[in-house]
Image (cartoon, rainbow, N blue to C red):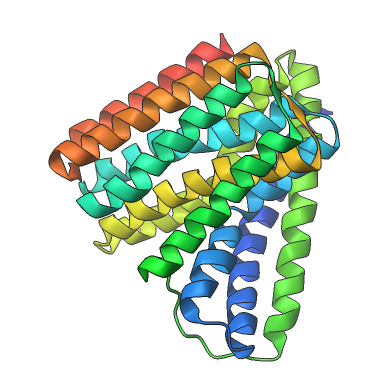
Amino acid sequence: MVVFDVLYVGVSVVALWFGADQFVTGASRVARRLGVPGLVVGLTVVAFGTSAPEFAVTIDAALAGQSDISVANVVGSNILNLGFILGGVALVRAMAMSRTLVARDGLLLVGSTAVLLAVAADGRLSAVEGAVLFASLLAYLLVLSRAGSTDAETAADPFHPPDAGRLLVGLALVVGGGHLLVVSAVDIARVAGVSEWVIGLTIVAAGTSLPEFATSLAAARAGRTGISAGNLVGSCIFNVLGVLGLAALVRPLAVSPAGVEGAAWLLGTTVLVVVLFYTEETLTRLEGGLLVVLNAANWLLNLL
């Protein structure tokens, strides 16, 4: 029944959110206990943790042969990050972002999205293309580590023995929640008579983007708007290069015409965001409202 599927979606979203939080906390403390430098923890463990819901859902859908949900989840999550979340947070408080971060991470986001559109244009993401995307992520992390970036530095929380269990429980919740979300979303799509692409772009993408929304809103309310914007840009890079790249490595993905159009819309949104940041180094409330409206229009066009 659709009622139960909707309930399962809610349960899976809570599991993804809570599981990702527990995984990041547990993994960070365990890594520190093992002597891993804080910067490396931030660039790997925390980066993976914030994108863990996208990883779980995208790879689960890829293994199940539901390519539309895999691609739509990444494209939809990034559109949400740059539209509803970035724009919505700017409506709460104007967001500042350093020109250095825009020049490095913003341009990489535009470039990686353009590459995604180019490789998806033939209707397929092969294992080789996935390997190129994932290798690009590893190169990006290497550049960040050599640059000595502290943007991803985590708090030096002390290690406690239960943290090892927290890591495992968090990972189990993310994997289980991701699988439940995919199964429930597919059932809803079939009953409602809409495509898996639309469900992936809306319900699934919204569910997996909740951690980014909570983190960005909390940072903005605390006046740390630069961190909020940087986290969203970094998450989008990780989604395109890491999540989709690994999913294509696990199983080549078919990309529907709607997927190519979605990637094109994402590229346009990405370019717009980077231009807005670069011209004034601030995202005003008016510009945030524009991004929210554009995101809403994209959802409406896909639902019609």
Identify the residue at image location x=30%, y=28%.
272
- Is 95 placed above or below 162 here? above
Q: Horizontal and vertical percent for residue 265? A: 45, 21
- Is residue 284 visible in the rendered structure shown here? no
153 with respect to 242 (left or right): left
Residue 61, image x, y percentages: 78, 36
| Quadrant housing residue 75 | top right
Name the image quarter holding the C terminus: top right
The image position of residue 255, as x and y in percent, is 69, 21
Residue 109 pos. (x, y %): 42, 40
Is residue 303 at all visible to an observer of this figure? yes
User: Compared with residue 74, is residue 146 higher up or lower down, i.e. above or below?
Assistant: below
Towards the viewer: 245 or 174? 245
Residue 83, compared with residue 303, is above or below; it is: below
Quarter holding the N terminus is: top right
Answer left or right for 192 relative to 97. Answer: right
Q: Is residue 153 above or below residue 135?
A: below
Q: Residue drawn 20% across and 40% down?
A: 278
Residue at 67 percent of width and 62 percent of height: 19
- Report the front residue among 113 and 214: 113
Is 102 placed left or right of 173 in the picture?
Answer: left
Quarter occupied by residue 67:
top right
